[in-house]
Amino acid sequence: MGCEPRRHSNVVLNLTPLIDIVFLLLVFFMLTAHFIEEERIDIQLPQASSSDPLENDQHVTVVLTPDGQLLVDGNKTSLNELTEVLRGALHAPGKQYVRLKGDRQANFGKAVQIIDAARLAGADALDIQTEKP
């Protein structure tokens, strides 16, 4: 009986293409993350000595600029559409209440309309964001 010796395969997995792809993905994500810029709105919050620090992220932010523009979580909206936009935003998971950030020079009448729209949209609560003097 002739016994054939076992052949050992010396197959080595070539990882060079995988490393190249991962490196290219890393470079791509680093470059695209650099171009994402956060828009900032210049508002001066009113001062209140009884203000508390922000605790959690379970809110929808409504910003009232000095010139009367409304932004809901960074997206421009009109006062007529505010109730529907807030209703949709409050149905997102984890969103329970509305936080109003308004400039000191903003129109108080619009602030009252925002509060009314938040109530109609079904917000559990509404906070007015201020800063300590």
Image (cartoon, rainbow, N blue to C red):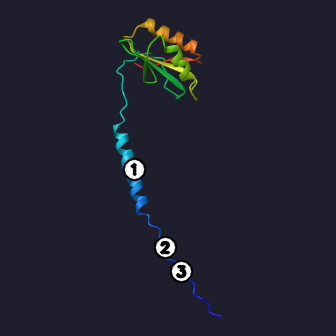
Q: Are marks 2 and 1 in contact (CB under 8 Å)?
A: no
Work out whether 26 lies above or below 87. below
* Whole-number angstrom distance, CA of label 2 to CA of label 3: 9 Å
Residue in the foreground of this view, choosing between 103 and 23 = 23
Extreme-front residue of the structure: 1
On the image, the x and y values in percent for residue 18 come to 43, 59
Report the number of discs: 3
The residue that appears at 36% across and 26% down in the rendered structure is 40
Q: Which mark is residue 26?
A: 1
On the image, the x and y values in percent for residue 8 come to 53, 80
Q: Earlier in the sequence, mark 2 or mark 1?
A: 2
SS of the residue under disc 3: loop
Extreme-top residue of the structure: 109
- Give the residue type at disc 2: Val
The image quarter in which residue 109 lies: top left
Q: Along the horizontal axis of the image, is 110 left or right of 27?
A: right
Q: Which mark is residue 2?
A: none
Q: Which mark is residue 11?
A: 2
- Give the residue type at disc 3: His
The residue that appears at 36% across and 19% down in the rendered structure is 43
- Classify the position of the N terminus by image quarter: bottom right
* Whole-number angstrom distance, CA of label 3 to CA of label 1: 37 Å
SS of the residue under disc 1: helix
**Classed neighbour count for the residue bearing mark 1: other residues with Cα under 10 Å, few (<14), some (14–19), many (≥20):** few
On the image, the x and y values in percent for residue 89 come to 53, 23
**Classed neighbour count for the residue bearing mark 3: other residues with Cα under 10 Å, few (<14), some (14–19), many (≥20):** few
On the image, the x and y values in percent for residue 128 come to 48, 16
- Classify the position of the C terminus by image quarter: top left
SS of the residue under disc 2: loop
Q: Nearer the viewer, mark 3 or mark 1?
A: 3
Q: Earlier in the sequence, mark 3 or mark 1?
A: 3
Q: Which mark is residue 8?
A: 3
